[in-house]
Image (spheres, grey):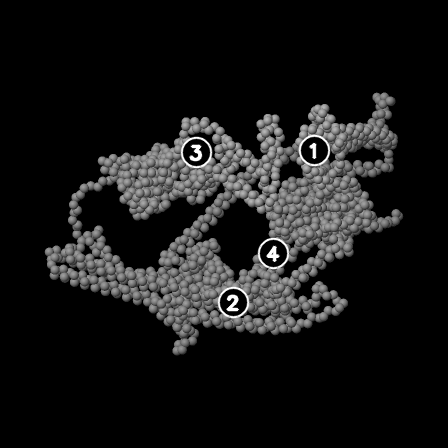
Amino acid sequence: MAEILKEWLTERLQRPISWEADKFGEMMKNGHIIACVLLSYHVINDEKHFLIRSSNARVDMENNWRHLAEWLREIDINLPAVELSNVMEGQGSSLLRLFYQLFLHLDKRDRTNFIKGERKMVSNLVEKMGHRFTVNKLEEEKESLVDDLSRPLLNEKHFIEWQRKKASQVKDTYDYVRHKYSKMLAKIEDSKIPMQFGDSVPKKLSEKEKKDMEKFALRHPCQFKNYTYEQLLDLEEKSLERKKSIIDTDWAKNYMNDLYTKIHKKTESEEFQKQIRNVLSGSLWDLTVAEEESRFDIGLAKKVMKLSQFEKQMCTQIMETKQQARNLVQNRIRGDREFNEQRTQQFNQFLDNVKEQIHLEVVEIDFEKQRQNMLHKKLYAEKMKRKRQHYYEICYETMLSIVDYATKYAYFKRLIEDDVPDHFIHEWKSLYFKHQPIFDILDPMEDILKETPIEEEPEPEEEEIIRLELDRQEALNDSEFKDYHNYSYPWTLDLLIPNYDHESQERKYEYLGTRVLGHAVYTLLDIKYPYPPPRPPADLPDFPVKVLLRGLPDRSIALPMQILLNWRKVFVVRLESAISFCLRKFKTEMIGCTDIELSFDKFVATAQGEEQKELIKKIKAEDEVTSKGSDAYVIAMLGVTSPNTKQTQTPKTIPEDEIRLSIPAGLGQYAYEALNFGASLTDHLLAAMIVELIKEQYDINGFCIVNYPNTYREAQILEETFSGREPPDEGELEDRDDIFLEESIAKHRKHEKDQYNKVRISNLVNDPHKKRIEKPFESYFTCYIHLRETENILEELVIWDLDEENSELIDRFYAVLGINYSMYYEVIDKDFLAQLCKYIIGDYIMPLKSCDRLFGESVLSNLDFPSSDDKRTKTKTVKPEVSNGKSKDRLLRGSKASKSTMSTELEVVKESGSPEEAVDEMVPLLEEIIQEENMSKSFDNAEDIKILAGEEDWDYGEIPIAEIIGVALATCWEEIEKIYIHDMQQLFFAKRLQINCLVPYARFIKDKMEQIITMPSPKQDLVSQFQKKYNDFENDWRDVNLTKNEWHCRVKELQHRLYHICDERKLYAEEQRQALICENWAMEELTTMVNTYISCMQTELNRYVLTIQLLHDFFFAMIKRMPPNDRLSSKDLTKIFKESDETSGSKKGGEDKVYRQLKAAFQDLQLKNIEIDFSNNPFNQVIENNVKFTLKLIKDTNDTYRSLISREYSEIAKIVIPVKKKEETSSDEFMSVEEIFKENALKCIGEWIMGINGEMFRASQRVLAIQYKCYHDMKLFNDHIYKTFMEIQNDINSYYMNEIKSVDRLSKYLQMAVEDARRVPESLVLEHDTFLIDPNLLQFAPPEPPSGAGEISEVASETEFKIVQLARLREQLKIVAPDGIVLQQAFIYIMQDFIFFGKESCEGPLFPEVWRRVDPEQIPKLVILLFGETVYIDWRDFLLYCLNLRFPTVEELLELRKYFRCCDLESTEIISRDDFLNEEFWFDSEFDVEDKYSMLRKMLIKNFIFELYEVSEDKMNYSAFLLAFCKSVNPIEGFVTALSMAVGKKICYVSIDCEEVVCMLIKDKQYKDECLACANRCTEQFIERLLTNVINTCEGVLLTELVYVEPLPDEKKGKKGKGARKMESSHSARTPKSQKSLSSRSKMAQSNTDVKTTFICQPCEEDAVVEEKPVKEEQVEEEQKTEPQADPELAYAVSQTVIWNVLKICLPWHFVLVPEERVTPYVEQVSAVMKRLEVDTDNGDIYVCKFVIDPDICKILHKVKKFTALNLNEEVHKVFF
């Protein structure tokens, strides 16, 4: 905004303006620049501008602003006195506000606006002076061209037009009424017109039949009576009995037909007479209506003629007045013509300037737009780049941490040579979770504790390293303290303390004591860091009626509604009334200071939206209604003066004084300014106005806000204004479902800005107090009513469930809160208005009360409001519920509707002043209270429950503490907590340093001892000298026995000398091991560790003492209202000191006695190689003594304070509560101060006792945990040291034994050489503990070997792989994927690497010559051609393709399988190498027997295939081998071959070959199913019939059924029908009709002698009948046509298990590795196909021919290429050449 003002002033003044804060105020406060701006807009002229001085003197500034205030008021800018003084003082904010108003009023204006205003003002002055003089314009009379006869008509032209319009309106009204009336008549006539029936043609009767009918009619005349239903039933039973006795004759039938004909004719004649009567009455009614209409027209015409005479006179006067006005207008037009021409010229020039400026701005905007787009693109690209970089850094850091963890784990495992202890793993995990490096940054770690001298400044790099290491250690300290505080691993009490019981009483008191301590701590913190005060609600009484009403169509309905609600003292609030009230308040309070003109027409002109304009019009109408009362009030306030009294214009307030407006007037001022500027009134302003209007009402019991709010935002602001609590924002509500909407409202909490939120917490104890805001949001209002208009209330659908389509968010919001009511109406009449008012006052319960009782005597009847005589339903009231049918209790929990029961769900808030209703309300309330008291008494008698201090339901004592004491105690606790946490973290850090030094020290001594053990020795020199002497000896003397004896003695001597060297080395190593033990490193470290844990106990003891002192001060200050004087001091525990300050015989200190004893005991155990455990650890006694001393001190302190608390309790118990007098009330509200203090003091005593007991148990528990953790760490330390030294001793012994064995082997070898009389040409090496014979280094040249035959090597072409190459590929691929399954992308990378780097291998290339020239980039294409687009592949298939062998047929594979099964009698699917190589394969015939190279390749191929599927040494899985070669050009054939290998039989899969057999098998199965179903039905019928017979026999009830059959014209059929008519059946009533008919048909079927076979059920019978008729023809056809027979050598169906096994073995990446369903939905597809085909067989087997033709299966088999046979050379040529 400042930039806009700066550009505007620079443009208007044509010079730059300084916008610095200090210069701007000094430059603008004299008003000279503002005067220049007004001059530039021609608001003032040069003469007025000359009056403004540019001086900053006080007098000149006041004079300037006095003129400027008047000129600014002319452009509707009013400067209050306060604002004017701020401007004169040079305040920048006031000046900016003034310039902003100037900009809004002057921008987009030019000189013509002000010239027009001046002209208008001058014209107004002229019109005001017009009453003194009369100016008449004389015009020359022109000759009239109108005939004298037509002149009267022309003079009455306007009147005639008015008459025509009036007549057309009357005619339209009449037509509408007549149309409505005729429509009602048509409905009446339609209801009376009878239904039309077609003419029935009666049956012609003979003369004889007519005579008989007449005789019967005379004998038995028909009587028509109104019978009841029971009489009709009786008549029907009598007629049935009579019917049995009547003989079935034709005469009776003819008689009945004649009777029916007469009755029908009589009915038709009556209907015809009714139609004639209706037509006659309709015609008479039309004549009557026409006569009435003519009479109405004549009367209307007479009235119109009477009115026309009076209107004629009025029109004459109006025409004369209009003529005078025309003359004035013509004179004024001539005067304005010159002004318009000048204005047009200026306007055109202005338009040209504006166009040019707009063009320049458009060019600049386009340029800026392009620049912004470019910047946005760059910013977006940079944002995405940083986002990706951020993700990459996160992933990279995570991977580095995982690698570091794995590296350090492997390093420690190598150092320890055993499993890594859990202590180190837990520490590494903590570092990982804290985002800290796992490896130590500073090495050694002890350097972090060294203090740098002041004169030596560390380097920046060293400072950074130290800082990073400190951060790392700080993270570990926090993690370990958190584990210690929460008893997490490794401080879990179950693992540390033996026989620990979680459910013990001590644990309970510890928990409660900690809660009491938390109560004390958080109470003190609340005193030191108070919560921010909540927002106060509106200052209104708690009205029983608070209603929101929406949808009221007319403002006039509010007045009768207010009349009905007056007796109930409910005030109807309208939005326009509240705004008008505040505006009038503002206008009234500004009288005498500033004249406020409420120009609503101007407000409407400046308003921007249609809704705003409508609101202003309503405010105007409201203001006009209340203007009379307000004017009278103003006159009364100013007083009445006599006419001749001289008055002076003295303002009500001095201009320099500040005007203090009331709250409503202030709101009216804001509204007035907003309406002047054309701005809309804010929702906060409207809500505040409504509150102020309600405040002004006195003696009311409630209010009803009409037609507000209309949106959720308005409702949110209104709720916040009234209740002080803000509902959730619209963005926070999840409106997908009403349950989510309710949960959002229930979970909403107000976000308060709490500056102490982060410091008002404790790291040691939790806050036991309930949260300050736990109550969910509740509406301030009692009811929300939404009126809905409808055309037909009966057709309106009742909306119970609200959703986004049929409601607004505000409706669903109040529906969730349980106060939403929807009312449908057609017309608002008295009854509807009364019902609406009942809902407003809350009259929902039964029985319904009368309107006189609710609204006063005869108020409704005397109400001037239209009523309706229509008694049908015109209103519907609905209380909408949730849309998903959830339970109401859950949806309305926390709301007002949920607090009432189902019977009082619509309970009304009644007026407290009505005695009758008060009694009605008190009765159920008293009943509930009595019932609750009875329940509480019975519960107390059943079980006496005592709530302990600190439990969830405990109410803490509330006694105020002095703020200075509370702040001091809170500060004291903060220091206690800070010191305690810091000390414990530092002790944990020291302990961690000691533990971390354990593994490096063990590795150090191991390495040192390894160097000592493996030191060089002179053994090799002795051996070399002996060998040289032995080889130099003459060969001729070697066979002499004496020579041999001599050399044996020398070998023995050499052996003894070597033994002696080994013994010396072992003794030296053991001496060095003992020296390391005597250095006492482990002893010193354990001493430090024990002192560290004793320091932890000391810290816990100090915290216990300080906490007890804090609780003492807290509760003592509560009870005594002053701090205590006694202080509690702590004691020091006994630690182990290496040196003593006072020793006898020396001035300097020596070793401490205790330390010396511990050192001797520990060293003795280590030297004796005794494992140190809990039983023999010398440090245990020191720790136990300190623990006992600490526990005793804790117990003594607790006893001391318990005695102190008992004294305080006795003093409080002695407080005597004064007895109340009889005249004093006995309610709880007037409880005495002593009684309240005693009750709270007793609670404090209980909390005090619980607090110190809980702290005692807590401290004791901590000390025990520290004790056992010390034992655990010492055991870990001792075990590792013991293990290390034992491993060193074992290494010494094993090294010594290996040396002795090496010497023995050397001696034995030399003795054998002596006995064989041969020299030793090889070099004998006796190095360390091993003896080697090096054949590569000879003492003399070996003899030449005899010449032999050459070896045969393998020969292959350029395109073929050598078996050696494939074997090397197999070994390399086995390393990557031992099971044969590898990722396709990984296989591609491996192949590319082999092609790239295989040439450099010393063993030769891995691929043939042709493959070396290929492009490695084409390898992916080749792999896709071989294996398809799959994620995984089987690399063994690639090696099989490289063999370039023909793939076998199914017969060949079955033969191989048969041989393998014979060799594998136990069915293990394993075969030996010999059996495999001895078998003849299908490719053996392709190799030339006479060619030795060909035979060599064949044997190599067999061995290669065996090793490819080898599962153990010389054992092979032949099933995998057979399945791997199940390939064909057609993948379906390959898949079927695999199935054949699984079942061991050839499978028919071609539809042409096996279609007939499969169809026959399917039909047989269907026939068997039908037969089975038929047998089940027959069995069920047989059992049912058997049960029926049993029941009939037992009960003895039989029913006989007579079947009537009409006679047939054929005689034979008639005979049969007669026999059938006499058939009887004895069925029970239990038998259904269908079964009866079935049994009758079965009997008829059994009686038929033509049927040979008897069938039980009808389907079998029908099938048999159909099949048995053409017997001979069927036999002829069967002879000609033979049925297909199944081949026993072929399999047509396989089990589903076989198919799944083949698919899972051959394609595991699609069916075993659980791929994604969207990418490879093969499992679902195969399952669906099997489910569809399993119905064709009895056992669920699948016909292969139908399975493989399924489109999904074909697609899978062609896509995977597992069963497809390919030629590798062809595929390679396709890709590379």
Whichever of callouts 1 and 3 sits on the residue coming sooner in the sequence is 1
- Which residue occupies the foreground of this view, 1481 or 362? 1481
Horizontal arrangement in the rendering, residue 1680 relative to residue 963 (left or right): left
> Which mark, by number, is residue 347?
1
Residue 559 drawn at (x, y percent) = 78, 45
- For label 2, the SS is helix
Residue 208 drawn at (x, y percent) = 71, 25
- For label 3, the SS is helix
What is the CA distance from the residue labelled 1 to the residue labelled 3? 102 Å
Whichever of callouts 4 and 1 sits on the residue coming sooner in the sequence is 1
- Which residue occupies the foreground of this view, 470 or 1061? 1061
Amino acid bearing label 3? Met
Q: Are marks 2 and 3 in contact (CB under 8 Å)?
A: no
Residue occupied by mark 2: 1259
Q: Are marks 4 and 1 in contact (CB under 8 Å)?
A: no
Whichever of callouts 1 and 2 sits on the residue coming sooner in the sequence is 1
What is the CA distance from the residue labelled 4 to the residue labelled 1? 60 Å
What is the CA distance from the residue labelled 4 to the residue labelled 3? 86 Å
Amino acid bearing label 2? Ala
Q: Is residue 32 visible?
A: no
Amino acid bearing label 4? Asp
What is the CA distance from the residue labelled 4 to the residue labelled 2? 34 Å
Query: Which image quadrant: the N terminus?
Result: top right
Residue occupied by mark 4: 754
Amino acid bearing label 1? Phe
Badge 3: how crowded within 10 Å, few (<14), some, or many (20+)?
Answer: some
Q: Is residue 1045 visible?
A: yes
